[in-house]
């Protein structure tokens, strides 16, 4: 006798969002034209029933007695080994609320054009309520801010505020209670924040800041003649270029950078990125301040830098390192060099600190042959040496 049983699950989710715009025009001054504020609230709801209840029949139990005479009830599901598994147990249902703000302004420049400037790229917060939780249904309040500067620099910070206050248990130990910070007339407990500052230097950095290395430029005109027959069969020529040339398109003059002697300038593309991160968090290992039920805070600093140098069209050199302020030494330091051999590529990388290792790879560029035509040599884990 064959029997069939349907095993299914379902959930429901609804989300709603909108945008509210506010505009402000300064009464005095002509440089700032308009300031715009965009407010975006979002509310979402999701629900899933408890498929572990007896009405679904997905779970059963039996009484077990072990060799020592201990009696216990064991819960199991006859569908746990099936192809699609068994739905989870426990009811879920939450309401999430999120708000986001964006402030921009339009500024008139010297040449009578309009430029858009971002004042606050994003300022938002998120909070949710778990309707299925028996205790502590409110989540922590998370806030975020992101500011973009005209110098291609972005400042971002995330902060967390705990909803429920600390309290002492019957043994005098600190624990998170069921009473909210708001009930004490206080804002959410600040748990910590993290922010990262980074900036990238490259060939154009000093030229834009100080006007260095502008040099002179002159127009390099190409001949207006027809395409040579030898170039038609050359596969290295761009197909779009050949198409335009065949159609008789007029060639636009191109500008080339030259030095003071009139020779083409030699450029060595490079970039160097420095990032500094600060993390503030509660120091739960210290003594709590009983009056306000707050732990002191501790700071964690990280400094990282990385960069790359393109020696030529085929050679590329990259490196990365950092400084560990906790142990007062360099963090993981790596360097790698790669060479494009047209049909093949060669790369070598080495880890200098805190453990030394190397990796050398020679493989085909085509994805179909990359796993077949490949030779790899690397150091083993036992050969790694720690530098003190």
Image (cartoon, grey):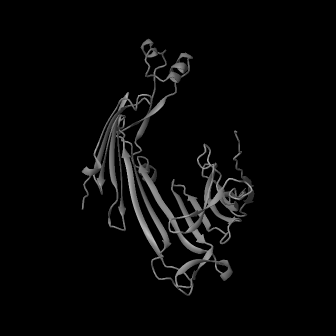
**Foreground: 63 or 348?**
63
Q: Is residue 356 above or below residue 257?
A: below
Using residue 156 as the reference point, say whether residue 307 is left or right of it.
left
x then y, percent, for residue 313:
37, 34
Question: Which residue is drawn at the image coordinates 49% and 19% (left, top)?
Answer: 224
Q: Is residue 263 above or below residue 147?
A: above
x then y, percent, for residue 164:
62, 75
When asked about the image quadrant of residue 150, the answer is bottom right
Q: How many marks?
A: 0
x then y, percent, for residue 385:
25, 54
**Foreground: 41 or 384?**
384
Question: Which residue is drawn at the image coordinates 61% and 48% (left, top)?
Answer: 111
Using residue 21 as the reference point, say whether residue 304 is left or right of it.
left
Question: Which residue is drawn at the image coordinates 44% and 52% (left, top)?
Answer: 200
Using residue 264 as the reference point, say whether residue 80 is left or right of it.
right
**Foreground: 112 or 194?**
194
When asked about the image quadrant of residue 162, the answer is bottom right
For this orientation, the residue located farthest to the top is 229
Q: Quadrant of the C terminus?
A: bottom left
x then y, percent, for residue 2:
69, 39
Q: Quadrant of the N terminus?
A: top right
Can you see residue 205? Answer: yes
Can you see residue 261? Answer: no
Using residue 160 as the reference point, say whether residue 90 is left or right of it.
right
């Amino acid at each position: 006798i064959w029997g069939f049983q349907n095993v299914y699950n379902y959930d429901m989710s609804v989300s709603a969002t909108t945008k509210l715009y506010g505009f402000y025009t300064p009464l005095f001054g002509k440089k700032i034209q308009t300031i715009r504020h965009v407010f975006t609230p979002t509310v979402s709801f999701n629900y899933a029933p408890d498929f572990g209840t007896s009405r679904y029949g997905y779970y059963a139990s039996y009484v077990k007695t072990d060799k020592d005479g201990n009696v216990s009830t064991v819960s199991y599901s006859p569908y746990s080994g099936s192809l699609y598994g068994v739905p989870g147990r426990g009811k879920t249902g939450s309401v999430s609320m999120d708000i986001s703000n964006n402030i921009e302004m339009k500024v008139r420049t010297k040449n009578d054009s309009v430029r858009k400037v971002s004042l606050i790229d994003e300022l938002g917060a998120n909070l949710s309520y778990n309707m299925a939780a028996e205790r502590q249904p409110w989540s922590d309040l998370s806030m975020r801010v992101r500011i973009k500067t005209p110098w291609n620099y972005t400042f971002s910070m995330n902060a967390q505020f705990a909803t429920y206050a600390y309290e002492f248990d019957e043994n005098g130990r600190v624990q998170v209670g069921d009473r909210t910070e708001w009930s004490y007339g206080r804002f959410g407990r600040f748990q910590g924040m993290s922010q990262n500052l980074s900036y990238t230097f490259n060939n154009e950095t000093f030229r834009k800041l100080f006007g260095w290395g502008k040099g002179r430029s002159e127009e390099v005109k190409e001949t207006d003649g027809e395409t040579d027959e030898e170039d038609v069969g050359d596969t290295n020529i761009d197909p779009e270029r050949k198409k335009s040339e065949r159609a008789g398109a007029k060639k636009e003059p191109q500008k080339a950078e030259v030095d003071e002697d009139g020779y083409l300038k030699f450029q060595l593309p490079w970039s160097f990125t420095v990032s500094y991160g600060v993390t503030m968090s509660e120091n739960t290992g210290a003594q709590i301040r009983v009056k306000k039920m707050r732990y002191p805070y501790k700071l964690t600093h990280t400094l990282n830098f990385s960069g790359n140098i393109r020696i030529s069209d085929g050679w590329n050199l990259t490196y990365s390192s950092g400084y560990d302020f906790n142990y007062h030494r360099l963090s993981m330091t790596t360097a790698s060099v790669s060479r494009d051999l047209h049909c093949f590529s060669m790369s070598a990388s080495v880890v200098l600190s805190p453990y030394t290792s190397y990796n050398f790879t020679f493989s085909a560029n085509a994805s179909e042959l990359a796993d077949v035509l490949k030779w790899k040599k690397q150091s083993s884990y036992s050969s790694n040496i720690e530098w003190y």
